[in-house]
Every structure is written in structure tokens, then in C-alpha cells.
Image (tube, helix red, strand yellow):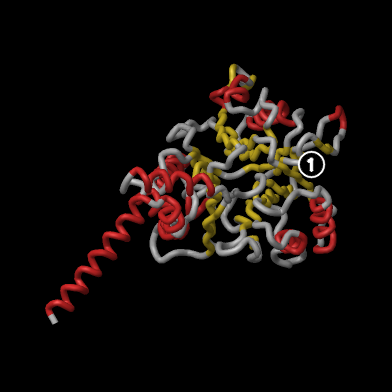
Amino acid sequence: IKALGGGRRMECCFSENKATYVLSNLAEVVERILTFLPTKSLLRTACVCRLWRDCARRILKTQQTLTWISTIGAGDSEDHMLLKVLAQNLENVYMLPQTVLLMADTETFLGEVDGDEQKQDTTRVARFLVLNKKFTRLCSLLLGGSVRPGLLLAMTPMGSAGNRPQEIEEGEAGFALLFPKIEGVKIQSFHFSNKDCKGRLFNETKLCEAGLVNNPELRVVLVFGYYTWKPGYSRFINQVINPLNEKNIVLIGGHTDALISSTSERSSRKKDMYGVAGLAFSGAQIQAATVLLEQDIDNAKTAEMAMQRLKAANIPESNTIGFMCACVGRGSSYYDDINNVEADAFRKVFPSIPLFGFFGNGEIGCDRIVTGKFCFRECHTDDKDDILHGYTTVMALIHFGSAK
């Protein structure tokens, strides 16, 4: 019996030694095993040894598909539900975020809209710092609040790109778009305010520093304005976006109630402060298109016809997202109390593309297609597109190239 037991112990030791040898020397086996780990666990295992570190790096390079975390409904604590959902789900994400676009309802996430402005700003910064700790130091974070309580966001729920996107018109809601480092794609965040003006003129060298001019590979710019009701904003936003409108790029955006970013100052308490922030996407492989849903589009049939115009752009549908910026005057009240009309029209035409966006107080965009060296522009007077609107919706497709 002792001999038999000893033999079993020897066999066990031999198996352990064999497993140790495999996990310490055979990169193909190690790499295969590590692909099953979420990124946060993968980063921890990279500290074990040089072989595991090299395997982890190769895996990270293959994780180039955008993902998202979203939530609908109030939580059971004072914090916004999105904070709780982020804490839970970031542990299980299979990519390393380099840029994050996060949007939530203003009232519950960023503070009372009609309250003291300095108190609002303190709340924003506190929440922003909490969020920033949840991401890596390399990550650029852009946080925006929808324009008013009650009419909020459009987003595809987590789980599958084929889930029905929802226009949330009441309650707590929020989403975080997580952009990985994508080969051939450069994403730059920018943030300008009226402090960047010399007198009444915006300092256009800021555009160059942000990669928004003198950049032949610039394809898409997401633009978000904030504190848009303040005197001087209208002139300011025109000075910022007019140089961009002359380029062969897709512009989409709107006016949010509040915004803060990792490139901004921690506090903007001056009563006369206003500005714009956003993301610039550069890369020859990026393709994009936008359509404008004007005021004559007021039922499900005409909304679907608008989506068919977007479909005609022939943008590849893999590794692609939809983005919408709608006026607060639209939604169910605009469509005779029918909910989700525009989001449903999008899903009917693009069933496998996730959709995200917000309702704002003014929209930025027009009918435009940018694919490779081809650009279609629907121009108006003076060979420039009319890109500032009200009571409209701008719908966009953004394709980031073939997923690895």
C-alpha cells in the first residue's frame, strides 16, 4: 500500500512538473489559455514572468473591437446606477480602453440643472474623479450630460449589438463607449473654451494642436457644446466648426447641458464660461456617413426612408457604431406619443449595429459620406453645408475598419 501511495505521489509530482514546464516555456499554450481572461485579469497575469507578459501584449493587440457598458433604471444608493454597473462590468471587459465617451442624464449624475452653478461643478468633478479611477492612466475620458431631466439618451443595451436600441425619456440612464487602441486609427480628445479666444476671436492654432486641421487622415469629429445659453457662445461655436465644415470630414454633435473631460481643467466656475469638447477620429480605413432628419420627417415611414438614405452610403456594418443627436423637441411627443420611432427605424435598417446618442438643445451635422478618397456633400449656399440645426435629428454611421 505504501508503495502504491508513493507511486501516486510520484505521478502527481511528475504531472505538476510537466504542467509547470508547459506554462513556463510553451508560448502557444500560454497564449491560448490567457485569451479566456478579461483584460483586467490579463494585465495582472502579465506580471508573472516575461513569457506571460509577452503573451499578454500580443493578446491586447488583437482586442480592437469597441465595446460598451450601459444601464437603465435607478440604483439602490445615492450614486448613479452607471457607477455601480461600471464597477461590476469593467472587471469582465475583453479590451483595454484608450478613450471613453460617457453620457448620462444631467439631473441625477451631474447635479441639479437649476441649482447653484458652483455646486453643480463640484458635483461634476467629484463624480468625474470617481470615474477616472475606474480606468487606466492611459485612458482619455470624456463625460457629458444630456440637456435636461426627463428627455435623456438613446442607446443599445449591453449584451449584443442586435439588442433593440432605446430612447430613454425618463428615469436614470447612462452609457460608456469604450474605444480600444485600434491599428490604423487615431482618436484624439479635445476641449476648447472661450478662454482660448483672443478678444472675440478663437485661437485657431488650438485646432491644429488637436489634429483638427492640417490632418489629411481626419475622417470624423464628434462635437459637444456646453453652457450654450451664455452670451458669446453662438459666435464661438461658429468660429470652431466653420474651419472643420470646409474639410471632407463627417461632423456630428449637439449641445449638452454640461461636460467635463480629462483634458479640461478640473473646475470651470466662471459664470461666463462656455465651450466645446469632443473626439476626432483619424485613419485612412475609417468610413462614415450622416443623414439629417428634418422637421418634415414626422412618422415612422419617413424616418425609415431617412435610414435608407444612410444605408445607401454602403458603409460596412462590421466594427461599426451608430450615433444620433436629436433635439429635445423630438422623441415621443414629436411622433404623436409613439415611443422609440427613430431608434426603431435605425434598427430595422441596421439590425446588427449598436446605436448611441443623446437629446440636446441644437444639433450639428448634415448629409455627408466619407469613404476612402470619396466624399459626398449635400451643399447649400456658398458651397458650405448648413450644419447647425434645431428640431432635427442627425444620424451617423462610423466604421473603424476590419476588426482584428
Looking at this rendering, what residue extends furthest in the left direction? 2
The quadrant in which residue 156 appears is bottom right
| Residue 358 x, y percent position in the rendering | 63, 51
- The relative height of residue 131 versus residue 345 in the rendered view (above or below) is above
Q: Amino acid at mark 1?
A: Ile
Q: How many marks?
A: 1
Residue 225 can be seen in this image? no
* Left or right: where 172 falls relative to 290: left
- The relative height of residue 245 versus residue 107 in the rendered view (above or below) is above
Looking at this rendering, what residue extends furthest in the right direction? 381
Looking at this rendering, what residue extends furthest in the front direction? 3
Residue 226 can be seen in this image? yes
Identify the residue shown where x is 54% and y is 30%. 272
Viewer-nearest residue: 287 or 260: 287
The quadrant in which residue 198 appears is top right
Q: Which residue is mark 1?
A: 369
Viewer-nearest residue: 116 or 74: 74
Looking at this rendering, what residue extends furthest in the top direction? 198
Q: Quadrant of the N terminus?
A: bottom left
Viewer-nearest residue: 336 or 220: 220
Identify the residue shown where x is 65% and y is 57%. 354
Identify the residue shown where x is 58% and y is 23%. 209
The quadrant in which residue 346 appears is bottom right
| Residue 328 x, y percent position in the rendering | 67, 52
- The relative height of residue 285 versus residue 196 in the rendered view (above or below) is below
User: SS class of the residue under badge 1?
Assistant: strand
Q: Is the residue marked by circle 1 packed among few (<14), some (14-19), or many (20+) residues within 10 Å?
A: many
| Residue 37 x, y percent position in the rendering | 43, 57
| Residue 359 x, y percent position in the rendering | 65, 51
